[in-house]
Image (cartoon, coloured by chain):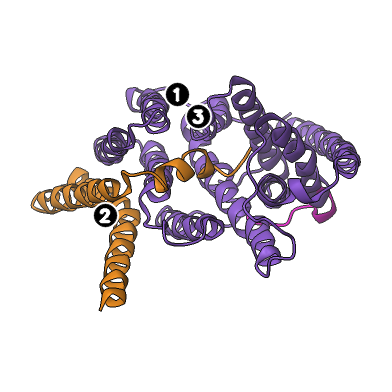
Chain colours: A purple, B orange
Amino acid sequence: MGLVTGEIVQPATTRFRRLVWVYPLLLVIEELLISNGYPQAGLLLLGLVLFLCALHTAFSSDRDVQRFVLALTLVPSIRIVSITLPLIQLPQVSWYPLIAMVVLFYAWIIANTLRLSPGDLGLSSGNLFLQIMLGLGGISIGSLVAWMIAPAPLLGSVASPVFWAIVACMLLLVGFDEEFIFRGLLQSTALPVLGRFGIPFVALLFTILHAGFHLVGYLLLVLLTALLFGYIVRWSGSLLGVALARGLINVILLLGIPFIPADMMLMLSAGSALLGLIALGWLGVQQRKRAARISEQQL
Amino acid sequence: MITIVTATITEIITGNGSASLAAIAIAILLCLLALRELASGLDDERARRLRTTLTLSSIPLLVVFLAEVLVRIVGILRGI
């Protein structure tokens, strides 16, 4: 099943399909435990979630549910890897690519096991110009998030010898990694199970993994952005734009903010927001034309 | 919308409980592998699916385990 289709068909609900809604609930409890100083209890809960996923896949006779729940094991695995890899002796700036590589390796194994094609995963360039415009829109989201949470920069100076290597890594690896998992793998397996609730479900999971910040406004922004990214990938059939946007958000938040003058940041944000909105409008028009073509063919 | 590992990683990794977290992760890995072995004694479709999911779920934990072993070995070699 490719990512691009005219409309999402709502599948019949079964007991095993409804059961997938238990996982966000367990993950909320786990994230709250971890972020409130009980990481050991949170980790045990993550182990339980993995075990429940295994039982769910085994006892459900619905192939779509089996595939989706297997892909869902990625979510607890991301958190397990991120809190248990022994990284303390390495500089903090190296943690992100190392964790991203482990998670990407696991995601690649899952995608291969599920025999998902590059088209299913959104691994196509699509309309390259449109995707780059959508990606640049990430600058405005990044500056909005920076204004909300003001994260500490990872490096003290642009002159650092590793600065540009880390920028490239954040842009190409960390952004792509998370979008590949959520908007690629999870979304493509969620849609046959949850139909029109597939994209909101994946956006909810994504937001839950940000719960450690304890800021309602920020979580709302994450949820809206995840929903927007989900529909962009669904309509455009490509991860390129959203992966570029995520990479730019991370670069701005973790590396760029202290080195960019405030007035320049404001201009960059306004320009990128405008570009993003034009690209979204363009995508909307394309999607409307595609939907009209499909309904004409059906008639 | 910062990378999802950031939300908790800094305070956990730099906190005091990081060694016990690795121990719990290894205990979870052992549990998953033990259950996988139990499931391999059964010979039906459900047991096969259970085995597959348990095997795949243990991969990230196995990476954590190997990294922990590597760090310990490096630590010992540095001490010599």
The residue segment tinted magenta is A123-130
Q: Are marks 2 and 1 on the same chain?
A: no
Amino acid carrying label 2: it is Thr
Q: Please, what is the dominant secondary structure of the magenta stretch?
A: loop
Q: Are marks 1 and 3 in contact (CB under 8 Å)?
A: no
How far apart are labels 1 and 3 at the CA level? 31 Å
Please tell me whether mark 2 sits on a helix, a strand or a loop: helix
Give the x, y percent position of residue A71: 42, 45
Closer to the camera, A223 or A161? A161
Identity of the residue drawn at 54% across and 59% down: A97
User: Mark 3 or mark 1, which is nearer the start of the sequence?
Assistant: 1
Disc number placed over residue A211 in the picture, else none = 3
Where A91 falls versus A203 (above or below)? below
Q: Are marks 3 and 2 in contact (CB under 8 Å)?
A: no
How far apart are labels 2 and 1 at the CA level? 30 Å
Where A73 falls versus A38 (above or below)? below
Closer to the camera, B63 or A256? A256
Please state which of the two labelled residues, at mark 1 or mark 3, is closer to the viewer. Answer: 3
Crowding near the residue tagged with mark 2, few <14, some 14–19, many ≥20 C-alpha atoms within 10 Å: some
Amino acid carrying label 1: it is Ala
Please state which of the two labelled residues, at mark 2 or mark 1, is closer to the viewer. Answer: 2
Closer to the camera, A199 or A78? A78
Identity of the residue drawn at 53% across and 35% down: A206
| Residue that badge 1 annotates | A12
Give the x, y percent position of residue A200: 57, 27
| Residue that badge 2 annotates | B55
Left of A32 or right of it: where is A291?
Answer: right
How far apart are labels 3 and 2 at the CA level? 29 Å
Indicate the chain on which mark 3 is placed.
A
The answer to whether residue A78 is magenta is no
